Structure formats: C-alpha cells, structure tokens
Amino acid sequence: MRIPNEGGLEMKRRLSYWAAAISATALMAGTTSSWAASDVQSAAAPPEIEIGAIVPSSGPFAEWGKANTITLKMLEDKVNAVGGVNGAKLHIVIYDDGARPAQAANLVRKLADDDKVLAIAGPLTSSAAEVAFPVANQAKLVATSQASSKPGVAANNRPWAFRNTVDEGVLAKSTVPYFKKAFGIRSVAIVYDAKDAVSTAIANRVMPAIVKDNGINIVNGASPISFNTGDIDVSAQVTALKGLNPDGVVIGADYSQAVTVIREMKRQGFVKPVIGGTPLISSAILKAAPDLPIVAPATYYPGVEGEGAANFTKDLTPLLRKGSGLPAGIEPSMYDANIYEIVSMYVDAVRKGGVALQAPKLASDRERIMSYMTGLKGFRGLSGPISFNKDGDAIKAFFVVLGKDGKWTEQVRGCSGPDGKGC
C-alpha cells in the first residue's frame, strides 16, 4: 500500500480510519454479510471482487483520466490492506477510452463479456455515457459515471445506468443567483465548445433558461459564440465577446478548453466574471488568470470540510503529484472523489448484498449490485450522505464555489434532493 511516510502510529491510525470508512455503511445499517465461508474462501483460488473502470487517460481529458487511475489504485490498496471484503480482494480493471464514445461502448462489452466484472465505474464524459450506457443496459451491468452531468443521460438508460453527479440544470439554479448577486450581473454573453455534449447542453439549454428566469439579459442569445474541442486560437471568439460588453461570461466547456478562452480574455484585457458548470472545476483553470473570478458548482473541492474529504485530499494529493504526466501542483478533482465513491459503493454492495462471487452466479450478482444502487440511502460519501433518484442521478451535497487568486472558496451549500432535502 502506498501511503506517505508518517510514522508507525500515524500509519496505524490511517489504516484504522479507512477500515472504518469502508465498513461504515454496513455498521450504520446494522447488517452483516450473508456470505457463507465456503463461498469466499478457497485455498487454491481466493475469489476477487472484479470491478471495471473506464477513464480517458488519453485524449482531451487525459489529466482527469490519469488522476482517476491513481485514485482507483489508491482505493484498491486501501481495501486490500485491511483484508479486502471477508477475504476477497478488490481488483479494479481499468481501461482508457480516450473520451471516444465508440471506444467506451466497446470497453463496456469487453468488461461485461471478457473480464466478467460485477459493475463499471465510468465512462467519464456525457458524450461517452450516452453511447456506453445503452450497452450496459443490454448487458444488464451497472455503469455509474463519475462526471456526466448533461440532463437526462442516466434517465434515458434505466435501470442499469447511474451517475454519481448532479444534473447541471439542478446546479445552475443555485450558481446563477449567486453569480448575479455577487457581481451585480445584468447581462451575459455565451461562448461554448460545440463538439462536447455537456458543454453544448450547458450553453444552449441549461444556462439560457435559468439566466432568463433570474432577470439577466443574454446579449447573444440568438447566436452564442462557439469553438471546437482542441482549438488553440480563440482570439476571434474573445474579440467578439469583448465587443458585446456583457457584465459576465457564460462558458460552456470543460476546464481544458475553458483555460484557452480565459487566457485569451486576460490577454485582451477583457476581465469579466465567468460562470459555468461542473466541467470548469480544476486546479488548472485557477492558474490561467488568477484575478479573473470563476463561479462553478462542485460536489467536492480541495478544502471542503469533513473528515472523509479531508483524509481523501491528504492521501491522494501526494500520489497525484508523483504521477506521470500530471502537473506538479495538481490537486484532487471532484471526479476523483466521485469515482472513489462509486467503487466504494460497489464494495459495500458486495459486503452486504448477498453477492456470491462465483462464476455461475455472475448474472444474479450483477442484479444484486443494481438493486443495491437503486435502493441506496445514506451511503457515507466523502462530503456527506449519497442516494440516487429515480433517474439514476445522485442525491448529494453540492457547493457553489468561487475560483480566484489560485483557490476555490465555498460560497453556497446545497442539496440536490427534492426541496433541497436528503443530504
């Protein structure tokens, strides 16, 4: 197990904490595993808890995918360091889809048929999830995305699709009022990545409706300015934005693409408050223009209070900073937290869901994982309890955060449950 060299007592304390965290939900529920000893122990071949993961370790979201991989390996080490689950060790099979939807769909088939996993964490993007989730449904295999937040993606693929994320439409109902009040916003202009599914949804569906509901004028509502994933020159788009002279800017893009826009805004002296969705959350975007305020929602951010989140941040940060191909000052993202929680849920499902871990019973084991996820209530997440609504989206705490001067600070705390309850 890879943990910082903090001395014997500290090592024992941290192992004890994670052992407690792994079993917390079972203890709170007052239940015990229904496995028979003969089902989980074999001198010749001990069973393993086979979980699949699909992350984009190459392509435009490679930083997220590489960080997800390190996060999953950390979790695997922690679970196995305390003996696994009733003697069964956790094994996470991780594949790179390069954020390509067709590749994500193919990997679901591979994980289902060749690797015979119990469930899948991923894929990350809404574009990939839209294609991969139907395949998971066909295979009768749970797939839970760590990042997809385009409205309706899980709802369209029930009952096997889940998202440990919150719909962007729900989040915008809290981010927009804060944005308006904090910066005196009366008008905004929209710019977005036309090649990305969730970015397009944020710019053309989610933000326009909620911005208007809050009495804010969209100066280019009839023709929002667009660019394409991978564009490195957006000077013409930013010049056009500057000419519109809005009070603020809506950016529909993931952080890696938004950074290009924000740097160009800074270069042209167009320093206006920015608002967007969860894809903006990254430590990298804070470095693009530190004096340019950025408002976005998150379900986790480095610095969020709580023992679970604090220990997660402390343990993962040094591992990420030693990771190949990652920025030296990288911090854990909400997508690292989300995928960590997803696999932790699957582990808990194995612990108390009657999962046999026997090849002839794979289909029924997968069914039990789905039933566990569907009925989940009050799972101990890093930032609070987690359950899922009828659409397969997480009911969990979220935060409206302000990025400025190199850090995120919490401004509003909310809950994605009905009437703000359930968190």
Image (cartoon, helix red, strand yellow):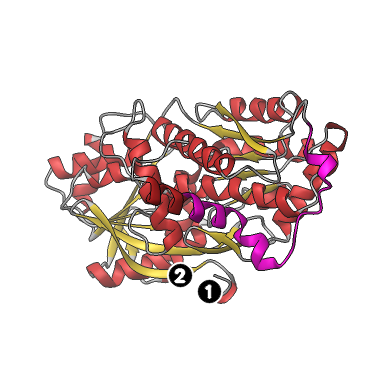
> Residue 414: which numbered mark, if any?
2
Of 57 and 24, the residue lying toward us:
24
Q: Mark 1 belongs to which amino acid?
A: Gly
Please say if 17 is above or below 421. above
Q: Residues within 10 Å of mark 1 (few under 14, many from 20)?
A: few
Indicate the position of residue 423 as horizontal and vertical percent values.
54, 70
Residue labelled with disc 1: 420
Residue 120 painted magenta? no
Q: Mark 2 belongs to which amino acid?
A: Gly
Q: Which of the 4 image quarters holds residue 92?
A: top right
> Residue 354: which numbered mark, if any?
none
Indicate the position of residue 139 as horizontal and vertical percent values.
78, 35
Q: Residues within 10 Å of mark 2 (few under 14, many from 20)?
A: some
Q: Which of the 4 image quarters holds residue 104?
A: top right
Q: Main secondary structure of the magenta part?
A: helix
Please report the residue visible at 75 percent of the width from the left and 50 percent of the height from the top. Answer: 370
Please report the residue visible at 82 percent of the width from the left and 37 percent of the height from the top. Answer: 362
Do residues under tags 2 and 1 come within 8 Å of each other at their CB atoms?
A: yes
Of 154 and 306, the residue lying toward us:
306
Indicate the position of residue 18 as horizontal and vertical percent values.
51, 52
Q: Which of the 4 image quarters holds residue 377?
A: bottom right
Secondary structure of the residue carrying tag 1 is helix
8 sits to left or right of 160: left
Q: CA distance from mark 2 to mark 1?
A: 7 Å
The stretch in magenta equals 15-42
Please report the residue visible at 33 percent of the width from the left and 31 percent of the height from the top. Answer: 322
Residue 37 appears in the rendering: yes
Mark nearer the N terminus (2 vs 1) = 2
Indicate the position of residue 318 as horizontal and vertical percent values.
33, 40
Query: Of all residues shown, which one is farthest toward the front?
Result: 8
Residue 252 appears in the rendering: no
Query: Of all residues shown, which one is farthest toward the right?
Result: 360
